[in-house]
Image: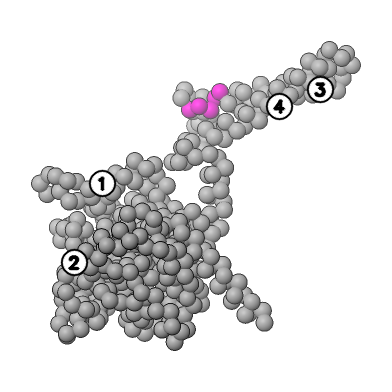
């Protein structure tokens, strides 16, 4: 009886399947019918009629197969405006792409993820969870959860869900007592944490809702804060307060220092073909991930491309006056490990009107001091990776393209050295 009911369901109205099944049935029937008649009829008029019937039946059969498959895909796949060939390409070709692990936070990492998802579906974004400002900070304090802001940005960047859903997750309330300043995505993840009972599960369920290509993981499931030590020896706690002291940062550390790594993040590192750092806030988004002992030790063990994407502009309060080499040296001094073996620096032209605008915010181009890199033994790559929009930041497509070029180049280079 149950099997019979399952069969009946296929004939429910509105499924957009019956019509194509019927078309296939009749097309196949007349295809066989005309083929048999062609083999036995000798009359010229009948042969012409049977030939036309065969051709039209064949066309009907092909159209029926195509539309039936399309109906199935539209029912089970969220990207309903996509062609079947695009869906197959994404599921087959992209699933074979390199396994990429990207560290960071803020808009920098999410921008690069946007471009990388066009090359591979095997992306793991590992995000620092030390935010204390804005919507994330308020939710962290009120609900005792990990800050969802950077997680949300990465989820949206990797999403295959319709643009409206992505815009909804990024929508920020402009008014309303208690809700003003919050983004819908942050509230959604917070609510999902309450429903599922854990932040980890909340991120996974949000990933399903947005149908993301890859996954997003917090670097740790422990609550943590950041503490900065400045050049004058003074210190300050709180991610949101660190950049506003008007002092040069000498060192950053986690509070507490024995924060445990997320096991899934460690697993991703062990399986990675490429490990990327940045772009993003050096001291508050990139380095905090690497201060987790097991994270940096596992990265150091890997003999793969470990690429640092140097920021295009300095960030006031964090990297004032730091050159490209200084950025990388800060990572090395904090980790004391073989964390980076490649570095990508922007060589694209920066618009003068935007430089003036950024200068008013005390943000300036990162100087590429090429000669200083030689002593680190790091492979240096240059590329036009700057956005042509109204912001001086990485362009998602160009940055992703350069990353893939570097990955393929280094893979060929290492393979050649092994064959010698």
Q: Is residue 345 visible?
A: yes
Which residue is tagged 4? 58
Which residue is tagged 2? 240
Dot 2 or dot 4: first in sequence order is 4
The colour scheme applied to this rendered structure is one colour
Disc 3 versus disc 4: distance between alpha carbons? 14 Å
Tell me the residue at 87%/17% (across/down).
41
Asked which quadrant contains residue 286, the reply is: bottom left
Tell me the residue at 56%/23% (across/down).
19
Disc 3 versus disc 2: distance between alpha carbons? 79 Å
- Mark 2 falls on what kind of element? loop
Direction left: furthest residue: 177
Which residue is tagged 3? 36
Q: Is residue 107 left or right of residue 61?
A: left
- Mark 3 falls on what kind of element? helix
Q: Is residue 81 left or right of residue 240?
A: right
Q: Residues in magenta?
A: 15-19
Disc 3 versus disc 1: distance between alpha carbons? 63 Å
Q: Residues within 10 Å of mark 3 (few under 14, many from 20)?
A: few
Q: Is residue 261 visible?
A: no
Dot 1 or dot 2: first in sequence order is 1
Asked which quadrant contains residue 282, the reply is: bottom left
- Prevailing secondary structure of the magenta residues: loop
Disc 2 versus disc 4: distance between alpha carbons? 67 Å
**Which one is closest to the eye, mark 2 or mark 4?**
2
Which residue is tagged 1? 171
Tell me the residue at 48%/27% (across/down).
15
- Mark 1 falls on what kind of element? loop
Disc 1 versus disc 2: distance between alpha carbons? 22 Å
Dot 3 or dot 1: first in sequence order is 3
- Mark 4 falls on what kind of element? helix
């Amino acid at each position: 009886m149950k099997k019979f009911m399952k069969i009946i369901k296929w004939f429910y109205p509105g499924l957009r399947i019956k019509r194509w099944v019927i078309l296939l049935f009749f097309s196949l029937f007349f295809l066989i019918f005309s083929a048999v008649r062609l083999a036995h009829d000798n009359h010229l008029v009948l042969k012409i009629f049977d030939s036309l019937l065969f051709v039209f039946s064949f066309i009907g059969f092909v159209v029926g197969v195509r539309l039936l498959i399309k109906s199935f895909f539209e029912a089970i796949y969220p990207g309903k405006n996509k062609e079947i060939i695009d869906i197959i390409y994404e599921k087959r070709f992209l699933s074979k792409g390199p396994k990429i692990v990207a560290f960071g936070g803020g808009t920098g990492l999410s921008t690069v993820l946007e471009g990388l998802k066009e090359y591979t579906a095997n992306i793991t974004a590992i995000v620092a969870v030390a935010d204390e400002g804005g919507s994330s900070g308020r939710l962290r304090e009120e609900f005792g959860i990990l800050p969802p802001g950077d997680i949300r940005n990465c989820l949206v960047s990797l999403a295959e869900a319709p643009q409206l859903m992505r815009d909804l997750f990024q929508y920020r309330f402009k008014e309303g007592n208690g809700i003003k300043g919050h983004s819908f995505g942050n509230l959604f993840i917070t609510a999902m944490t309450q429903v599922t009972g854990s932040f980890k599960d909340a991120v996974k369920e949000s990933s399903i809702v947005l149908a993301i290509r890859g996954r997003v993981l917090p670097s740790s499931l422990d609550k943590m804060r950041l503490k900065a030590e400045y050049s004058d020896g003074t210190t300050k706690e709180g991610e949101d307060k660190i950049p506003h002291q008007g002092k040069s940062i000498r060192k950053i550390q986690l509070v507490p220092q024995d924060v445990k790594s997320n096991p899934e993040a460690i697993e991703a590192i062990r399986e990675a073909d490429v490990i990327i750092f940045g772009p993003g806030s050096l001291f508050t988004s990139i380095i905090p991930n690497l201060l987790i002992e097991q994270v940096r030790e596992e990265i150091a063990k890997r003999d793969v491309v470990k690429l640092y994407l140097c920021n295009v502009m300095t960030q006031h309060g964090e990297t004032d006056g730091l050159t490209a080499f200084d950025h990388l040296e800060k990572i090395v001094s904090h980790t004391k490990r073989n964390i980076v073996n490649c570095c990508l620096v922007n060589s694209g032209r920066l618009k003068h009107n935007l430089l003036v605008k950024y200068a008013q915010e005390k943000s300036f181009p990162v100087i590429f001091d090429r000669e200083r890199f030689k002593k680190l033994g790091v492979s240096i790559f240059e590329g036009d990776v700057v956005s042509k929009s109204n912001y001086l930041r990485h362009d998602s497509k160009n940055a992703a393209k350069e990353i893939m070029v570097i990955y393929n180049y280094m893979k060929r280079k290492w393979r050649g050295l092994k064959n010698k």
